[in-house]
Amino acid sequence: MSRTAPDGPAAARPPMTNPHADRVKAVRALATRSGRRRAGRYAVEGPQAVREVVRWAPRTVRDLYLTDDAADRYAEILADAEAARLHVHRGDAAVLDAMSPDAQGVLAVADLPEAARAGARDEVPVGPLGAEALAAVLAARPRLVAVLAQVRDPGNAGTVIRVADAAGADAVVVAGDSVETTNPKVVRSTAGSLFHLPVVSGVSVADAVDALRAAGLAVLAADGTGDLDLDDLQDAAAVAGAGAPAGGPADLRSPTAWLFGNEAWGLPPEDRDRADAVVRVPLRGRAESLNLGTAAAVCLYASSRAHR
């Protein structure tokens, strides 16, 4: 299927009205991992995420589906799609609901990242492709990177990607046996941030840490067992000021990669040992812990502020 629309605007074509059509079933199948890998594509659901993929990554978009009501309500999405010459399809509410109950009248189908597509089609391990993608990110000399290690909950992964985007991070690395970034809940949870910054997957935690350190980034593991207190590191960075040279891997003013683990069991000892330092977020109240998204926000914003 061509990525561009050669035959005029969507309004000139009859709308889709059959929720049992083969095309509808094919889009619905993208909700599963096997369906995404067979098709080499994934679904982007809802107006916020679709707006961002059409605006920031239009070359990855294969098809855009809207109800008439959504086309009127989100005219900017339709305008951007038509400017990018994307295939735009009108469908009634039953069709969009059959494609995805989370579409809210707007859904896009996009190509999987190359690593996942090659792995599905040719049974080639995605690691080398992921390593190449990471090398390309590191060539741009990032100063702040979030690394997810064995994070399997899609809502948590998507939230950290969104937080990293908001904090001004340069990239996110989804490492090890983490959830797929094209999982529908991950895509929705990022609220479009998935399309704003590089999100690299298909690398092991060990390879990611080695590559980041070789590129000059300090690797700080966020863990409640840490010997270092984040408040102390923030105080030290503030006292040193922007003009003084960075004073080692635990200096928040240094280029930094934060390593975040699975919310249920945290970072295993071998991953904590790979870090240059293990940092705890202080808990002053009676809460036993912070959820992953909150802990990531505190740590990433601490580095972002120190870098300013």
Image (cartoon, rainbow, N blue to C red):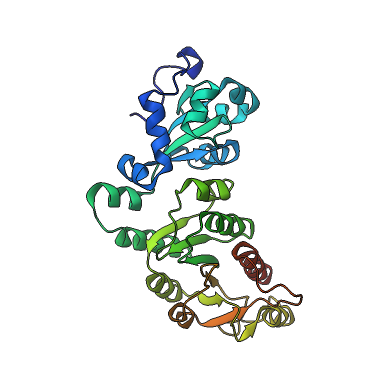
Asked whether the viewer can see residue 139, the reply is: no
User: How far from the left and from the top, in percent, is residue 236?
Assistant: 70, 83
Is residue 131 depicted above or below 34 in this figure? below
Is residue 99 depicted above or below 159 in this figure? above
User: How far from the left and from the top, in percent, is residue 141?
Assistant: 49, 66
The answer to whether 42 appears left or right of 124 in the picture is right
The image quarter containing residue 49 is top right
The answer to whether 15 appears left or right of 162 in the picture is left
Is residue 237 depicted above or below 132 in this figure? below
Q: Give the residue drawn at x 55%, y 56%.
A: 161
User: How far from the left and from the top, in percent, is residue 75?
Assistant: 62, 26
- 110 vs 144, nearest the viewer: 110
Asked whether the viewer can see residue 77, the reply is: yes
The image quarter containing residue 23 is top left
Q: Give the residue drawn at x 49%, y 65%.
A: 148
Q: Give the residue drawn at x 71%, y 79%.
A: 231
Quadrant the C terminus occupies: bottom right
